[in-house]
Image (spheres, rainbow, N blue to C red):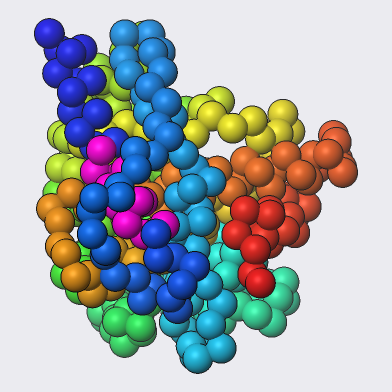
Amino acid sequence: MQVRNTETHLEAGAMAQSIFFSEMRQQYHALPAFSITTGTRNQIHTERMQVTKVGSGTHLEADAENILRTITPKLDPNRHKGQAGKIAIIGGCREYTGAPYFAAISALKIGADLSHVFCTKDAATVIKSYSPEIIVHPVLEESYNIREEEKRYISAKVLAEVSKWMERFDCLVVGPGLGRDPFLLDCVSEIMRHARQSEIPVVVDGDGLFLVTNNIDLVSGYRLAVLTPNVNEYKRLVQKVLNCEVSDEGATEELLSLARRIGGTTILRKGKSDLISDGETVNMVSTFGSPRRCGGQGDILSGSVAVFSSWARQQIAAPKEDSSDSTPNPMVLGSIAASALLRKAASVAFEKQKRGTLTTDIIECLGKSLEDVCPAS
């Protein structure tokens, strides 16, 4: 009975996505980016969502390319800088400078207009040296650099520095290169709370997941958050939230339960096939990427999720003639699109570089991979 209930729930979620995509597709090529209006519903077509049995659960193989085409905005000469996305990365410390750079530059390579990194002073100069395209803010602090009596003042100063920029951002990515310094994590917790109060979407990866796993209230009930755990990070989440071990047999039900227990936060479980759930649906992206598992691909993914979910939110928020309660979750759409694009770019990069494939090679293939699906002209 549990499996049947799950299947019914997933089918309802798939229908909501089908209605949305049909409406968007009918007028996508005729109107400027994000200026999508809903037409009559008598021509709605069911999107290709393949129901696949895996273990005891049901996954919906997402029509990822159609999602990419639907939410990626057209290039419009009437638009100005910033309207295609302003993304901020919260991360970067003495030990880790590559991860925030990978996330930030990936967002730009996909099509975001502006990409910021808020990092520690030690990391700032290094990250700036990687690319002049990224706006770097050396405002975070680690405990080794401050005295105990200064912590309250410094914490307030860090929050104030980030907060004055907050309203400009379409999404925050928390965690790439963050590290686990206790004082730094406390400051980032306050930044996340402020983002939530301001209804700024948040993508959590890397050491941000370490922070959230130990402070689940930071994202609990927040539907504009996405968690992107790898195998070990997912295991810790399941142990902490569901108080059990990961079960491959019931992967769908387990992921649904986890997302529901956290309160509807979207979870992108990375693996051979990526599974994505907000507690309402489970979507799978199983397109083959690359057998080369070089470090940094998760950072590409987190920056990509930030961009695509921002684009999806703007699509959904555009005025419509005929409103519907069946609008899909933009954070889920963004996660599906990001997963699919990363896999495609990784495949293209591997064809060229084989065993020598690096994260920087994959980043260079992001633009071409998106162009193949959504031509700019």
Q: Where is residue 348 in the image (x, y as percent from the top left)?
A: 76, 44
- Residue drawn at the location 57% of the way across and 70% of the way down: 111
Q: How many marks?
A: 0
Q: Nearer the viewer, residue 193 or 270?
A: 270
- Left or right relative to 90: residue 103: right
Q: Say whether residue 361 is visible.
A: yes
Above or below, 281 against 177 in this view is above
Q: In this picture, is 1 found above or below 235?
A: above
Q: In which quadrant of the rendered view does residue 295 lie?
A: top right
Residue 16 lies within the magenta run? yes
**Magenta highlight range:** 15-25
Work out which quarter of the rendered image holds the N terminus and state it.
Answer: top left
Q: Can residue 181 be seen in this snapshot?
A: no
Q: Is residue 80 rendered to the left or right of residue 58?
A: right
The x and y percentages for residue 266 are 30, 44
Q: Where is residue 213 in the image (x, y as percent from the top left)?
A: 29, 40
The residue under the point 56% across, 77% down is 75
Quadrant of residue 165 within the rendered picture: bottom left
Q: Per the image, is 260 magenta?
A: no
View extreme (front): residue: 42
Q: Nearer the viewer, residue 317 or 132?
A: 317
